[in-house]
């Protein structure tokens, strides 16, 4: 993986930018479709990150320590 992983906040910021671009009247249908695809990919990244955090929370043991996450 060559690229640095983004935080949720960074992804949300990109999503806001995508939404702003899509709301501009001069955006072509083709560009709107490309922006839509980018947005869907960003939403998937958010969902994956949230799922990972939820799994980690479920693995906390009684002492509040994180149990190792088993490879799936």
Image: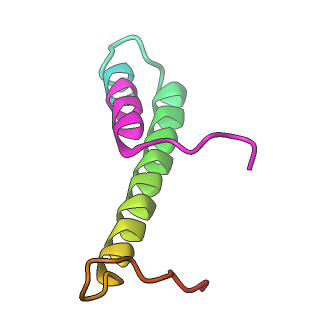
Is 33 rendered above or below residue 66? Answer: above
Q: Magenta span has 35?
A: no
Q: Magenta span has 14?
A: yes
Image spot of residue 19 (x, y percent): 33, 29
Image spot of residue 22 (x, y percent): 36, 25
Is 15 rendered above or below residue 72? Answer: above
Between 18 and 4, the residue placed more toward the observer is 4
Where, by quadrant of the figure, is residue 3 drawn?
top right
At 33% from the left edge and 14% from the top edge, which residue is drawn? 25
Q: Which residues are magenta?
A: 1-17
In screen coordinates, is 47 left or right of 1? Answer: left
In screen coordinates, is 63 left or right of 31? Answer: left
Image spot of residue 41 (x, y percent): 50, 49
Is 6 rendered above or below residue 57? Answer: above
Q: Name the residue at the right extreme.
A: 2
Q: Name the residue at the front extreme.
A: 63
Q: Quadrant of the C terminus?
A: bottom right
In screen coordinates, is 43 left or right of 37? Answer: left
Between 69 and 14, the residue placed more toward the observer is 69
Where, by quadrant of the figure, is residue 63 drawn?
bottom left
Image spot of residue 7 (x, y percent): 43, 43
């Amino acid at each position: 993986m060559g690229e640095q992983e983004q935080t949720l906040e960074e992804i949300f910021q990109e999503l806001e930018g995508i939404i702003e671009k899509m709301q501009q009247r001069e955006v072509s249908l083709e560009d709107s479709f490309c922006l839509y695809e980018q947005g869907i990919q960003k939403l998937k990244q958010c969902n994956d990150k949230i799922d990972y955090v939820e799994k980690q929370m479920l693995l906390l043991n009684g002492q509040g320590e994180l149990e190792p996450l088993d490879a799936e």
